Image: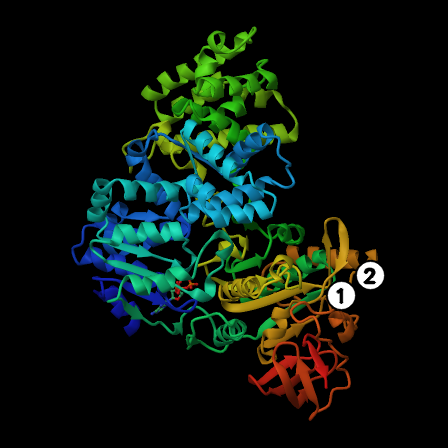
Amino acid sequence: MDYLAGLNPEQKAAVLQTKGPVMIIAGAGSGKTRVITFRVAHLINSGVDSFNILVLTFTNKAAREMRERINHICGPEAKNIWMGTFHSVFAKLLRVEAEKIGYPSNFTIYDTDDSKSVLRAILKEMNLDDKLYAVNFVLNRISAAKNNLVGWQEYQQNPQIQADDQSGGRGKLGVIYQTYVQRCYRAGAMDFDDLLYKTNELLKLHPDVLNKYQQKFKYLMVDEYQDTNFSQYLIVKRLAAVNENICVVGDDAQSIYAFRGANIQNILNFEKDYPDLKVFKLEQNYRSTQNIVNVANSIIANNKDQLKKNVFSEKESGDKIKVMRAYSDNEEGKTVAESIMQDRSSNGMKWNDFAILYRTNAQSRSMEEALRKLNIPYKIYGGLSFYQRKEIKDLIAYFRLTFNPNDEEALKRVINYPKRGIGDTTVDKIVVAADQHNITLFEVVLQPAQYLDGKAPAALQAFGTMIQSFQVLAKNQSAYDAALYIAQHSGVLKDLYADKSVEGLNRYENIQELLNGIKEFSEREDIEEKGLDVFMQDVALLTNDDKDKNKDADTVSLMTIHSSKGLEFPQVYVVGLEENLFPSQMSLNSRSDLEEERRLFYVAVTRAERKLSISYATSRFKFGTLINSEPSRFLDEIDAKYLELDYSAKPAQSSFFDDERSAWSRKDTNKSSGGDTFSKPKPASAAPVKTTSILAKAHVVSKDFKVSDTSNLQVGMQVEHERFGFGKVLTLEGTKPDIKATIFFKEIGQKQLLLKFAKLSIV
Ligand code: ATP
Ligand code: MG
């Protein structure tokens, strides 16, 4: 029982409360995930069969880490726990039960690209304007419907939905939705949302199946509950209905997927669904220093919509939060990279102690460039997945067809790759014939003479026969042998081998890497079923992070804030704190969207354990033009007493300066990590940015508010702040341009602000 010693009394109480519904809604870093981990370990140690436990996590990586910890405490029993993301867990369940709802058990999982491709074909056939019916828009609409469990029939009949669509001039959405569903069904394919939608359907229509899994999953736990959508909520509710041993943990302040349908209502519903719910409060943050926790609290306090909670840290107060200004996005990259370099050598840290978090994927470019220049190893998480590369998707399409010849997206992808003389016109004809005779594309391919007018290319039938031969082979061979055979006999390997360009070589190597991965899978000893079909089951759900063999490599981590949820790093850089970037431009029109951005900022800063740095650039390339940017309003919201400004970055005025900087950088990389003589470039006279120039633009939240020049601000003056309202200046400290004002606001009390960020006017 000594593992319980690593828990505080509240956490321990939550771990020991194994029966009945339990909810923990608590702030970041308070040990919610730790409670789930220890709870599972405790259940197993108390004699609960590990096969009876279901844990739903936010990423597969989180599940893996949790399993390792549980394994540490309980040993190999940990292997039997069903644990993973909603999508991977219910894909696994559907593989067993799919036939009950009319799908083959080897159904294909369509990824987002596949879904878009299906939609594109439908829009083209229906001759619809691809601006009005933009593919992303249509897919979002269908996805939202599915996640609210609105099927196409209901979609077409619901007067409100119809009125909405009509008023937007998009009256055809219902029909598109219907066709999309029918196409996926014909292809034996489920898209990502179907994995949840169909699970709900299965559990609703088949009480015997529901009962089976209610008996199986006697104990359920859900991490990051605040980000579940209605479809996920209902699955959990259904499965837990008999035993009611359900524990959910989350933080409403970290809800960052409202745009995908996640709903705070699920937390409120939970209380209604289980009247004898036990609620546990966790208030102590074990992750971060006091300064970081205080900053996080001061940020989230600006949101109106929140469940109040008290979060504190008993760690040291720690460094202040460093705010770094740069003059361009490239400069920002340099500043961050140099700062990492310096901190690493002076504090004896490892590269993987550092993370750089950004709002949008596009921001990684300037960071990567700067890191590369200083030879800092890094890894991007959640970028384009290995499995989404063209050559990998091509070969995998052959595998998909082998196990599910009805998979239309796979068929269209490779029917003429490598080239075998089957043109687009022929493919179009196949689609029309399949529609006419109500059969699958593959059936047409196998008997072109019967279904196609005119002379079909001989290659067509040869292609069909080849796929059939793969099917026979895959039944009897190991995953690796089958994969290699298909790669060779489909012509994919040969085609890539023939391309001697650097990119071609790269693609060939990627295919080799995929084959190596399959080989490793074939040789695994911990699983019994090792056919290529088993390897293929979850491929569509895999991300880069799942594949990575060098996960322990010492590299700086780069990722979007969305993918950093639940993670922690000793040192965190949150970059791009600029208006229209963070908060994003899209969020500025409604309070709820803006509050979601603020929660995102809260998630970002609470990833940091020891040191947090925030940066912004005063200009940035966007769509090919350099635009000026102003500091984010979020900076203004942080109480200035927690901040330390580092404006050592100089504007890149001349190429001379750039040369000087990179020479300096090179010198440093060659140095041993002693760090004794490390000195930052000292730009004593960094060009000051005038307060007015930063703040000149009219503000978006309240259009009437005019920021005035506060350079003459005096103690005792009355001021108005854009959000905090009226107040009086109590003290002024520091020197220009970094003057801090302590102001007493009538509504919110005392607050310290950095004048140059503060949206103030003198009244
Ligand atoms: P988030 O909201 O970011 O997901 P969380 O509430 O899930 O955070 P955890 O990740 O479980 O928090 O815990 C944060 C850190 O604090 C982890 O490193 C964890 O090991 C540590 N921790 C939590 N509780 C304790 C404790 N009682 N004693 C020591 N360390 C703890
Ligand atoms: Mg967590």
At x 71% / y 69%, what residue is drawn? Answer: 648
Asked whether the residues under the numbered discs 1 and 2 touch, taking CB atoms below 8 Å apart as contact, a structural biologist would say: yes
Residue at which label 1 appears: 650
Under tag 2, what secondary structure?
loop
- Which quadrant holds the N terminus? bottom left
Q: Is residue 288 left or right of residue 733?
A: left
Q: Quadrant of ligand 1?
A: bottom left
Where, by quadrant of the figure, is residue 629 drawn?
bottom right
Give the image location of residue 164, x and y in percent: 54, 49
Query: Residue at point 66% right, 60% down?
Result: 580
Mark 1 belongs to which amino acid? Lys
Residue with the most extreme bottom position = 716
At label 1, counting other C-alpha atoms closer than 10 Å, the crowd grade (few under 14, some 14-19, many 20 or more) is many
Question: Which numbered dot is residue 132?
Answer: none
Q: Kindly tell me whether residue 690 is visible in this rendering.
A: no
Residue 738 image point, x, y percent:
70, 79
In this rendering, position of residue 174 left or right of residue 240: right
Instruction: For residue 33, say whether it is visible.
Output: yes
Does dot 1 land on a helix, a strand or a loop? loop
Give x and y (percent) for residue 389. Answer: 55, 35
Disc 1 versus disc 2: distance between alpha carbons?
8 Å
| Mark 2 crowd level (few <14, some 14–19, many ≥20, 10 Å Cα) | few
Residue 653's disc is 2
Identify the colour scheme used. rainbow
